[in-house]
RNA sequence: GGUUGGUUGGCCGAGUGGCUAGGCUCAGGUCUGCAAAACCUGCUACAGCGGUUCGAAUCCGCUACCAACCUCCA
C-alpha cells in the first residue's frame, strides 16, 4: 500500500492526495460546539471522528496545530434571541456562567471518549476585536453594507468579484436560494435574501453586546470561525472540518468571509462528518430525537436495553466511516459491545505470546505483518477506520489461534511478534484512541484478583478430584456475581462481565 | 421545489468493473468432564427496470424509496 494520505475534499467531492501547505506541518480547524446546553451524542461522534483524524495525522509524523473553537455568542434562536442569552435568562445566570458550565461538561465528555484536547480552543467572545476587524476589511472591500447598526455580507457583490464562487461548497446557486429563501423579521434590512449578518445591532434587551464602529452589537454567527481560523492558522491553511449540517450556510459563509476579507482561500481541504441518526432520523437537540451519552453509559433510556461504555461507543463509531450516516440501534450497540470486548481480550492474549520461530518468519508471521501493514494502509485511504478495523479482526483470529494452538508459534519469529505487539498497540491506542476499560482496575481490583486466585485454586482442587458438582457450583456462583470462568488448556481464566 | 448523499445478507456496516470485507446473530463441527471462550465450516446480499462491457453491487439512464441541508444545529 502507498504511504500517501488521501482524503475526500468536500470542495471538489473527490478524494485527493493530501499535500500540506508547509511540509511536515498541518493546520486543522474544526467547528466546535455552541455551549448553551449539554453536549449531545452527535457532537461526540463528530469530535471523535476528528480526534482520530488528528491522531492519525500525528502518527504520520505531521506536526499538527489543531484548533477547535468554543462558540459562546452569536447563534440566534428562531425568536431571534441569542442562544447564550436565552440559556442565561432561563437559568437566571450570567451568559458566561452558562458558557462555563457547558464548556466544562463538554470537556469532561471529550475526556470520557478519550478525545485529545485541541492545541488551541479559542472562544468567540475572546475574539470580538478580530471579528470587528474582519467586518471592517470586508466593508473596505465593498462586499458588505451597513444598515441601522447592522452589517450584512453582500453576496451578489461577492459573486461579481469572485467568479460566482458563492455556493461552490454546497452546490447551491444564488438564484435558486433567492426563490426559496424565507424572509425572517430580523433580516428585513437585507438587500438580498442570501445576504447574511456579519455584525448585528443589539436590541435594548440583548445581554451580550460590545462596542463597535456601528454601535453596540454582537458578531454574526459565521464570523467567529473565519476570524479565529485566520488568526491561529493563517489566511490559507490545510484542513477545515465540521459536521455535514454546517456545510450550508455556515461553511459557505465562512469561505465567503475569508475570501471577502483578505482575498485568500481559507482552508484547502474541507472535511465533513456525517450525521448520527437514531430511529433513522437525525439525532438533534432541537427536535427531541436524542439520547444523551450519559443515558447510554448507564443504560437508562427507553431506546436501549443495556449500558454502553464510552469505549464501546468509540468502537461503534470506528466501525462506520466518518462520511457515512450512523444509525444508532440497540442491536448494533450490542454487536459493538461484544466486538470491543473480543478485541480487548485478543489484545490481552497477545501479551502472553512469544514468537518461537527462527529468525526467518513462517507463513503465519508473514501474514501478521501483511495484515497490520494493510490496516495502516486503509487509514491512508481517507481514514477508513471500518476497513482498518476489519484488518485488525483478521489479526484477532490469528492471535487467538496462536494462543489456542490452532496456529503454531513456531511460524512466527520473535522479532515479528515484538513488532506486532508494538504496532498493534500504536494502532489501537494511539491512532484509534481506544483504551482498556477493565472493571478490575485499582486497589479493589487487586483485592478481587487475589480472592479469585484463591477461589480458582480451590476449584482446581475440586476438578482434580473430579468433584464436578463443587466445580460447577463455584462457576455458577461466580457467574451470578458477574464473573465468567473459562477453563483453558493452560489453566483457568476469568473475566468480569 | 432546489442542493447533496444514500438504498448491500437476520442486524450493523465496508467495498467503485473480475478476487473472502469485518463485527454481531444463527446452524454444524473441533477442543473441553460439562459449559464458556477460542478455532474451523456454512447460510439468506447487493431497491427495481433498462443500457455499456467478455464481465457490474461497483459505470450510465430512468423509476421508487430514504436521509441531511435550503431556518439554530456536529
Image (cartoon, coloured by chain):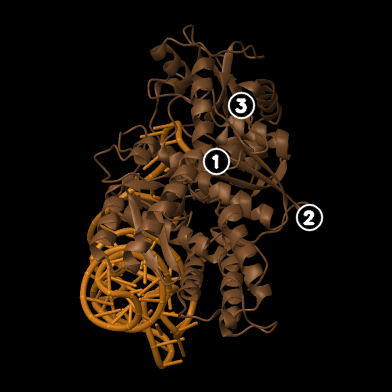
Chain colours: A brown, B orange
The location of residue B30, given as percent across then percent down, is: 33, 83
Measuring 66% from the left and 24% from the top, which residue is drawn there? Answer: A127
Q: Quadrant of the N terminus of chain A?
A: bottom right
Tag 1–tag 2 contact (CB < 8 Å): no
Q: Tell me how far mark 3 sits from mark 1, CA to CA.
A: 18 Å
Q: Quadrant of residue A111?
A: top right
Look at mark 1 in the image and give the residue it sits on: A251
Q: Going by the image, does A427 lie left or right of B50?
A: right
Say whether residue A243 is visible: no
Q: Mark 1 or mark 2, which has the lower sequence index?
A: 2
Q: Going by the image, does B18 lie left or right of A226?
A: left
**Secondary-structure class at tag 3:** loop
For the residues tagged 1 and 2, is the chain the same?
A: yes
Look at mark 3 in the image and give the residue it sits on: A123
Q: Going by the image, does A365 lie left or right of A113?
A: right
Q: Chain of mark 1?
A: A
Q: Chain of mark 2?
A: A
Q: Quadrant of residue A475?
A: bottom left
The location of residue A71, given as percent across then percent down, is: 55, 28
Q: Mark 3 or mark 1, which has the lower sequence index?
A: 3
Q: Chain of mark 3?
A: A
Tag 3–tag 1 contact (CB < 8 Å): no
Look at mark 2 in the image and give the residue it sits on: A23
Q: Crowding near pointer 3: few (<14 within 10 Å), some, many (20+)?
A: some
Amino acid at each position: 500500500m502507498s504511504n500517501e494520505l488521501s482524503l475526500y475534499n468536500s470542495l471538489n467531492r473527490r478524494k485527493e492526495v493530501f499535500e500540506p501547505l508547509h511540509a511536515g506541518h498541518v493546520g486543522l480547524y474544526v467547528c466546535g460546539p455552541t455551549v448553551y446546553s449539554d453536549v449531545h451524542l452527535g457532537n461526540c461522534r463528530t469530535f471523535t471522528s476528528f480526534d482520530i483524524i488528528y491522531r492519525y495525522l500525528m502518527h504520520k509524523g505531521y506536526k499538527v496545530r489543531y484548533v477547535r473553537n468554543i462558540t459562546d455568542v452569536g447563534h440566534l434562536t428562531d425568536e431571534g434571541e441569542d442562544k447564550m442569552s436565552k440559556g442565561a435568562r432561563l437559568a437566571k445566570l450570567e451568559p458566561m456562567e452558562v458558557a462555563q458550565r457547558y464548556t466544562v461538561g463538554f470537556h469532561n465528555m471529550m475526556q470520557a471518549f478519550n478525545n485529545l484536547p485541541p492545541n488551541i480552543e479559542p472562544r468567540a467572545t475572546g475574539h470580538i476585536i478580530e471579528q470587528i476587524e474582519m467586518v471592517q476589511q470586508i466593508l473596505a472591500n465593498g462586499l458588505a453594507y451597513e444598515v441601522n447598526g447592522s452589517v450584512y455580507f453582500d453576496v451578489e457583490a461577492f459573486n461579481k468579484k469572485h467568479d460566482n464562487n458563492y455556493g461552490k461548497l454546497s452546490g447551491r446557486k444564488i438564484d435558486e436560494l433567492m426563490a426559496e429563501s424565507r424572509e425572517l423579521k430580523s433580516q428585513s434590512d437585507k438587500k438580498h435574501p442570501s445576504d447574511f449578518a456579519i455584525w448585528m445591532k443589539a436590541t435594548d434587551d440583548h445581554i451580550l453586546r460590545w462596542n463597535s464602529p456601528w454601535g453596540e452589537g454582537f458578531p454574526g454567527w459565521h464570523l467567529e470561525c473565519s476570524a479565529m481560523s485566520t488568526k491561529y492558522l493563517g489566511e490559507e491553511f490545510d484542513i477545515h472540518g465540521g459536521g455535514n449540517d454546517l456545510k450550508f450556510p455556515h461553511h459557505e459563509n465562512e469561505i465567503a468571509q475569508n475570501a471577502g476579507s483578505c482575498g485568500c482561500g481559507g482552508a484547502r481541504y474541507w472535511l465533513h462528518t456525517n450525521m448520527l441518526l437514531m430511529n433513522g432520523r437525525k439525532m438533534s437537540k432541537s427536535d427531541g430525537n436524542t439520547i444523551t451519552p450519559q443515558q447510554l453509559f448507564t443504560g437508562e433510556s427507553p431506546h436501549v436495553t443495556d449500558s454502553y461504555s464510552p469505549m464501546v461507543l468509540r468502537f461503534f463509531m470506528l466501525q462506520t466511516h466518518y462520511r457515512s450516516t450512523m444509525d444508532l440501534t440497540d442491536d448494533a450497540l450490542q454487536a459493538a459491545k461484544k466486538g470491543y470486548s473480543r478485541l480487548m481480550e485478543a489484545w490481552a492474549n497477545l501479551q502472553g505470546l512469544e514468537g518461537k520461530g527462527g529468525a526467518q518468519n513462517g507463513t503465519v508471521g508473514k501474514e501478521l505483518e501483511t495484515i497490520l501493514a494493510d490496516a495502516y494502509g486503509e487509514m491512508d485511504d481517507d481514514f477508513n477506520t471500518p476497513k482498518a478495523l476489519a484488518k485488525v479482526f483478521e489479526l484477532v483470529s490469528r492471535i487467538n489461534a496462536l494462543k489456542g494452538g490452532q496456529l503454531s508459534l513456531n511460524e512466527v519469529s520473535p522479532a515479528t511478534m515484538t513488532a506486532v505487539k508494538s504496532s498493534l498497540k500504536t494502532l489501537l491506542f494511539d491512532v484509534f484512541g481506544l483504551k482498556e476499560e477493565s472493571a478490575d482496575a485499582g486497589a479493589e481490583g487487586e483485592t478481587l484478583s487475589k480472592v479469585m486466585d484463591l477461589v480458582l485454586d480451590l476449584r482446581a482442587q475440586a476438578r482434580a478430584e473430579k468433584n464436578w458438582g463443587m466445580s460447577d457450583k463455584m462457576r455458577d456462583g461466580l457467574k451470578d456475581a458477574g464473573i465468567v470462568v473459562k477453563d483453558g488448556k493452560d489453566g483457568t481464566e476469568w473475566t468480569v462481565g
